Amino acid sequence: MTSLGDIPIKVEGGTSATDFGNALPVLSEVRHALARLIETGEPTQIDLGAMPFGPGDEERLMALLGNGEVNATIDALGPTRIRETAFGGVWVVEYLNADEQRVALHLEIDEVPQMLRAQRDDFTDALAAIDARLAPVSSNEPADGQRTD
C-alpha cells in the first residue's frame, strides 16, 4: 500500500505571500485621480486603511509610488508625516497618534496636501497679528511717512 508521502505533488502558479494583488488597482485609481486633477482641478483622497490589502500590498504600492523630494512632519495630537511620491501631485499622508501608532494612511492627489494648507479662518487672525506688530512702528511715524528722530 502507498502512503500519502509517496504521492508526487507538483505546485503550479499561485500567488506569492507578498503579492496579494491590490497594489496595481490602487495605482490605477491614482492615475485616474491625477488625470481628474489635471482636467478639472478636483483633488482626491484615497483612504488606504479602507483598502483590502493583503500581505505585502502596502509595501509594493509604496515601492511603485517611489519617493519624491519633499518630506514634512506636522506635530498636532501626534505626528503627521507627509511625503511626496515620485509622481508630482501624489502625496502619502500618514497620521500617527501621540504614541506614534498609525491612525490613518491616505494618498492625496492634489497640488499641496490639505494638511499643509493654511485654514481660511487663520488668515483673519494672522492679519490682526501683523497689524498689532505694525501698530507700534506706525505710531512713531508722522502721517507723511517721514521719521522725526
Image (cartoon, rainbow, N blue to C red):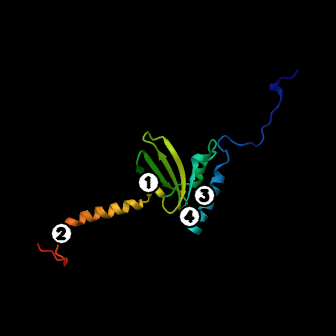
* Residue drawn at the location 24% of the way across and 63% of the way down: 133
Q: Which mark is residue 106?
A: none
Q: Residues within 10 Å of mark 4 (few under 14, many from 20)?
A: some
Q: Amino acid at mark 4?
A: Glu
* Residue drawn at the location 60% of the way across and 47% of the way down: 50
Residue 98 as seen in the image, left or right of residue 86: left
Q: Secondary structure at mark 3?
A: helix
Q: Position of residue 85 (x, y in %)?
A: 53, 56
Do callouts 2 and 3 mark residues in contact (Cβ within 8 Å)? no
The residue under label 4 is 42
Mark before the other along the chain sequence, 2 or 4 = 4
Q: Which mark is residue 30?
A: 3
Between circles 4 and 1, the one closer to the viewer is 4
The residue under label 2 is 139
Mark before the other along the chain sequence, 4 or 1 = 4
The residue under label 1 is 72
Q: Nearer the viewer, residue 121 or 137?
A: 121
Residue lying furthest left in this view? 149
Measured in 3D between alpha carbons, the distance from the residue under mark 1 to the one under mark 3, in whole angstroms, is 21 Å
Mark before the other along the chain sequence, 2 or 1 = 1
Residue 114 as seen in the image, left or right of residue 44: left
